[in-house]
Amino acid sequence: MNKDTYSLLENYMISCAEDSAHDKEHIYRVMYNAMRIAKTEENVDFDILITACLLHDVGRKEQFADPTLCHAMVGGDKAYAFLVEHGFGMSFAETVRKCIQTHRFRQNNQPESLEAKILFDADKLDVSGALGIARTLLYQGNMSEPLYAVWPDGSISNGENDDRPSFFQEYKYKLEKMYEKFFTAEGKRLACGRQRAAAAFYNDLYREVQESYEGKDLLGDLLA
């Protein structure tokens, strides 16, 4: 890939990057993660990989406007159309589309090619560790979702067995379980190196919230 082609793809990516949790720096980190993973693999098509990394979130704007849409599916189609329009081969564009459409957590739409697996792992690596916690909080703040939910009895939900959107629910539903879902050995190794930081943050935050609510009983005694 030459610099002009890279700039074409990069400029299109930047024009689509409006979500602060999925901004251009997220895209660059995913691409750099992918390069680190790819150097441990053989027979990687770097043109496919770089293109898929740069364009993997171009459908975010559509999903943000309509949450019923899947940004991976929309983004794959947008990337395909853009690539064909700008003279890339249909086979190349289709391979990139498949990489993008399989980069989300989906049981029925798993990545198949090596490049798709590297993109998946590189993207998930950016949701691991302290960085993943920070991005999750940023995204949920944009969506006006709370840190935690309270059960009818007044106790704090830790997010487990809870379908109400919150940071605790997102941690238990996705972040805590992601470390066994990597496809490449290097991706898993890098992610596991970050796991402790994410768990420590969640556990400390849950403990601090519970400690704060101990004052509720004292208030109740005063108001009795």
Image: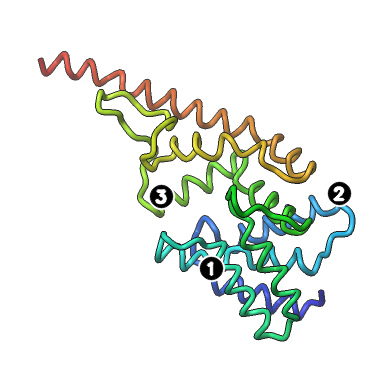
Q: Amino acid at mark 1?
A: Val
- Where residue 147 appears, as percent x and y from the top left, is 39, 38
Q: Nearer the viewer, mark 1 or mark 2?
A: 1
- List the single residue furthest toward the front: 108
Which residue is at 81% across, 65% downward?
46
Q: Of 88 and 25, which appears nearest the observer?
A: 88
Quote the CA–CA distance across marks 3 and 1: 24 Å
Contact? badges 3 and 1 (CB < 8 Å): no
**In the foreground, 69 or 124:** 69
The secondary element bearing badge 3 is classed as helix
The N terminus: image quadrant: bottom right
Q: Is residue 217 above or below residue 43?
A: above
- As measured in the structure, the alpha-carbon distance from the residue carrying label 2 to the one carrying label 3 is 36 Å
Q: Earlier in the sequence, mark 1 or mark 2?
A: 2
**Labels 2 & 3 near each other (Cβ < 8 A):** no
Label 2 vs 3, first from the N-terminus:
2
Instruction: Please state the horizontal and vertical placement of residue 189, each as a whole percent of the image.
Output: 76, 38
Residue to which mark 2 is pinned: 40
**Which one is in front in this view, the residue at disc 2 or the one at disc 3?**
2
Q: Where does label 3 land, which residue?
A: 141
| Left or right, residue 57 beside residue 150 | right
Depicted 192 relative to depicted 4: above or below? above
Picture disc at residue 74 = 1
